[in-house]
Image (cartoon, grey):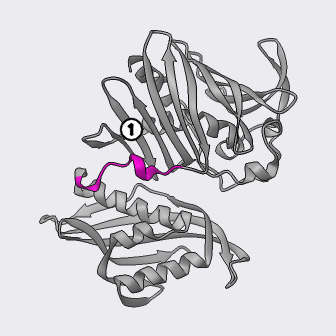
Amino acid sequence: MKALRATLLVLGALSWPVLAAGSDAPRPWLKGIATPNELAGIHTVRAEADVEVSDGENFNTTVIYHDPQRAVFRSKDADRTVTMGIEGKYVWTFDGTVEIEADPFVREFVLGHQFHAQILFYDRLYPDHEEPRQTTLEDRPCSVVTSGDDNSLRSLYYDPAGRPLGMRMHHGPEMRITIKFGDWREVGGVSLPFLVWIDDGRAQFEYHYTKVRLNEGSLEEFRAPLDQLTDEQALLRLHRVFMDDHLFGRSSGMKEGLAENVVIVSRGEVHPLSGDETLQTLKGILARTDYTVYDDLIRPVVRVSNDGTLGWVIVQVAAGGVQLDEEGKPAGPLEFVSAWVELYEKVDGSWRMNGNVSNFRS
C-alpha cells in the first residue's frame, strides 16, 4: 500500500468544503447520465473496486458515502485491511483490532476517494463553484465547472452531452492530480463510471469497479465492535448512532442504547421516563419530522468518571428538514441549532444513556 499512502498525502493537502443541505441549481454535467427525478432520489453510494498501481501494487477498496459527516474508505491487500471513517467531527482508522482517532487529513482522503459522489454531488460539495465555461480537455471540446482558488482548485470536465469526462485538482504548483472516467454502465437508471484512472504525479492508479450501488450501505458494517473500543470511543460511537437514527428516521440504535430509566430535561421541564417511554417519545418526534441535515458542529466533548461507570457527552448539532403533519405530509420548514449533554451509565459492561439535558439556540 506504499503508493496508496503516498496518494493519501497528496489528497490530504486538498481542502473539501462542508456539504450544503441541497441545491436547486441546474447541473449540466449530469444531464447525460440521468433525469433530474432519478438524481434527486440518490442519497447514498456504495462502491467496490480492484485497484492496479503503476508500481505493481494491487489492492481492493470499498467506499460508502452519504454526506461529508458519514463516509468510509476501506483498502485491503494480501497483508492488511485498513478502514478509515468519518463520523461527524470524529475521524478514525481501524485495522481490525484497534480504532485510532485519525489526523484531519484522513477526512480529506476519505472524501477525496468518493469518486462517484464527486460527480453526483459536486454542486453540494462545492457550493462556491463558478458558472460553467467552455474549454478543452486533451484537445477535446468540453465544458468545465470549477471551485476554489489558485491555491486549492477543483475542476470537473464534461462533454456536450452532459457526461463527466474527468477532474483535475490542484494544490499549489507542486500537487496536481488528474482523474479520468470511463466504462460507463447503468446502475438503477443512472449511468456511472466503472473505470477511474488517476495520475497524482507520482504514480498512476486504475480503479476497476466491480460493484456500484445506489441508496444501499451503512457505516454500521465498517465500525469496530463496541467491546474493542475505549470508553471514550464507545460513547462517541453511541452518540453517532443516535445522530444517524434521527437523520434516517429509524429507532433501532436508540433502542439498544437506552437505559431502563431516562431523565429528559428540555425547555425548562424535567421528564422522568422509562426506556420504553423514551423510545416512544423519540419515535413520535421522528414521525413528525423529515431531517435532511443532522450534523455535529463540534467534536463532542467526552468525559468518563474515574471508576469507569459514568460518562457524559457534550454536543452541538445543526438540524434541518421539514415538519410533517399527522398524515405525514410536509407542513413547513424545520431548522435549529441545539446543544445538549448525553448522560450514560455502564450496565453489565455496556454503556446506556440514562439522561439528556438540552437547549436550543434562539
Q: Is residue 340 magenta?
A: no
Seen at 46% across and 71% down, the residue is 251
Q: Which residue has dot 1 on it?
A: 83
Of 189 and 111, the residue lying toward us: 189
* Residue stretch in magenta: 217-227
Seen at 30% across and 37% down, the residue is 95
Percent position of residue 182, x then y: 69, 23
Picture quadrant where residue 126 is located: top right
User: Considering the image in quadrants, where does the C terminus appear?
Assistant: bottom right
- Answer left or right for 3 relative to 325: left
Neighbourhood count class around disc 1 (C-alpha, 10 Å): few under 14, some 14–19, many 20 upward: many
Percent position of residue 37, x then y: 79, 53
Whether residue 264 can be seen here: no
Q: Is residue 222 magenta?
A: yes
- Answer left or right for 244 relative to 199: left
Residue 318 vs 27, above or below: the answer is: below
Picture quadrant where residue 271 is located: bottom left
Element marked by disc 1: strand
Amino acid type, mark 1: Thr
Picture quadrant where residue 336 is located: bottom right
